[in-house]
Image (cartoon, rainbow, N blue to C red):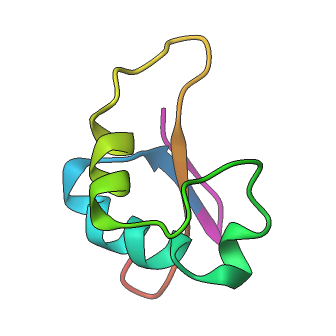
Amino acid sequence: MFARTPRLLLRPGFPEDAAALAATIADEGIVRHLASAPWPYRMRDATAFLAAPADPVLPQLLIFERTAGA
């Protein structure tokens, strides 16, 4: 599933997103707003999250702020 608005992009996570995901969730300002996440959040956590089997009922999606290039 992909959804685009003028400001945001909602899509599944891909393995190449691991570094950006790890860096984002490692930010205390971000992780404190999540229901649960390993702390400290490391690259191996992002890789495992993105490699997890997809659940068709409860998909795991990433939200990106769109920039001029997106």
Magenta-drawn segment: 1-8
Tell me residue 11's x, y (percent). 47, 46
Q: Is residue 2 in the magenta section?
A: yes
Residue shown at the point (77%, 48%) measured from the top left:
35
Q: Nearer the viewer, residue 8 or 24?
A: 24
Give me the residue at 58% from left, 82% from top.
Answer: 27
Q: Is residue 33 above or below residue 34?
A: below
Asked if residue 66 is positioned above or below residue 55 in the image, the reply reads below
| Quarter where residue 6 is shown | bottom right
Q: In the picture, which quadrant includes the C terminus?
A: bottom left
Q: Residue at x 27, y 56 (%)?
A: 44
Across and down, in percent, residue 59 comes to 54, 26
Q: Residue furthest bottom?
A: 68
Please identify the quarter of the rendering in which residue 21 is found.
bottom left
User: In this rendering, is residue 48 above or below 47?
Assistant: above
Q: Residue at x 37, y 47 (%)?
A: 13
- The residue most toward the left is 16
Name the side, left or right, on which 29 lies relative to 49.
Answer: right
Q: Position of residue 46 (x, y in %)?
A: 36, 55
1 to the left or right of 17: right
